[in-house]
Image (cartoon, rainbow, N blue to C red):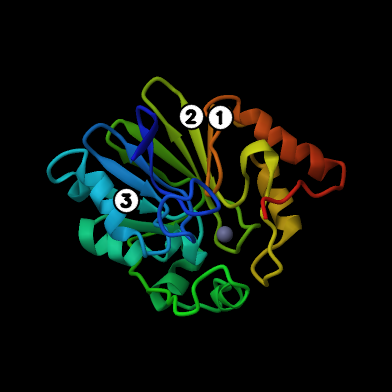
């Protein structure tokens, strides 16, 4: 486990990040509300036991105190581990309401997994595990994780079911979890898949303008532990001058 802040740690990350767990894994973050926990994203599922082992180091029964698994979207590198982690921990799986049935049915085409597997992003024998959904998210929903509050913003663009999470501590420090919508330096990830739209993404990121955010925790590559607004502004500057921000892949 790599702890970035008192209340944010990383428990998995693949080759498009820290090259630590399964190569296809996204960054999986642990929110530590002080005795109560949540995960942001779940990885591919190939590293579920590594994630549980990392959480286990926090103390006896820590995994059972994971209250939520907040999914930023349903691409398999983020959501494929939801079923295994839900089973092991009893955590509630939270996802964009429009994507709930896609996750429940394990619809690989709806999350572009068929295309991504063909393109080599996943091993050929990788299969997506369907998962029950406990919380169908609406824009503005709020949750408590111990001493942390979590606010949801639904903003499709990188995929049809993108959800951003604003995590606020008791002293008002705000961390933003953007999944694959926004990365360090204002980079983005546009895919040639039916569920990705640059114009929707531009609209989605515009909604971040004026949000007071301190830290940025993206789904791949490194986080920004301060000055998150500069990374948001870098992407908005590109979109506003009718260009696309540089892509991470
Ligand atoms: Zn994605």
Secondary structure, mark 2, is strand
Q: Quadrant of ligand 1?
A: bottom right
Residue 201 or 61: which is nearer the viewer? Answer: 61
**Residue 163 x/y as whole percent:** 52, 52
Q: Earlier in the sequence, mark 1 or mark 3?
A: 3
Residue 202 or 128: which is nearer the viewer? Answer: 128
- Label 2, label 3: how many angstroms apart (C-alpha)? 19 Å
Query: Which label belongs to residue 51?
Result: none
Name the residue that disc number 1 marks.
213
Query: Which label belongs to residue 174?
Result: 2
Secondary structure, mark 3, is strand
Residue plotted at (75% across, 47% down) = 246
Name the residue that disc number 3 marks.
68
Q: Earlier in the sequence, mark 1 or mark 2?
A: 2
Task: Determine whether, in the image, residue 192 is placed left or right of residue 70.
Answer: right
Q: CB under 8 Å between callouts 1 and 2?
A: yes
- Label 1, label 3: how many angstroms apart (C-alpha)? 22 Å
Residue 210 showing in the rendered view: no
């Amino acid at each position: 486990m790599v702890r970035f802040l008192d209340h944010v740690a990383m428990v998995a990350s693949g080759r498009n990040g820290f090259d630590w767990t399964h190569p296809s894994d996204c960054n999986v973050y642990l929110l530590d509300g002080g005795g109560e926990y949540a995960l942001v994203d779940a990885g591919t599922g190939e590293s579920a036991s590594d994630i549980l082992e990392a959480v286990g180091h926090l103390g006896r029964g820590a995994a059972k105190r994971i209250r939520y698994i907040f999914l930023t979207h349903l691409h398999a590198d983020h959501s494929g581990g939801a079923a295994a982690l839900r089973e092991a921990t009893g955590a509630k799986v939270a996802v964009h309401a429009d994507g709930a049935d896609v996750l429940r049915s394990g619809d690989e085409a709806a999350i572009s997994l068929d295309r991504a597997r063909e393109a080599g992003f996943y091993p050929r024998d990788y299969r997506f595990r369907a998962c029950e959904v406990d919380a169908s998210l609406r824009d503005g929903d709020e949750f408590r994780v111990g001493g942390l509050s979590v606010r949801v913003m639904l903003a499709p663009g990188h995929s049809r079911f993108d959800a951003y999470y604003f995590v606020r501590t008791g002293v008002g420090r705000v961390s933003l979890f953007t999944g694959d919508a926004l990365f360090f330096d204002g980079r983005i990830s546009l895919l040639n898949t039916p569920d990705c739209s640059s114009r929707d993404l531009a609209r989605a990121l515009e909604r971040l303008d004026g949000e007071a955010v301190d830290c940025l925790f993206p789904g791949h590559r490194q986080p920004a532990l301060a000055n998150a607004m500069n990374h948001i502004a870098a992407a908005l500057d590109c979109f506003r001058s009718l260009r696309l921000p540089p892509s991470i892949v």
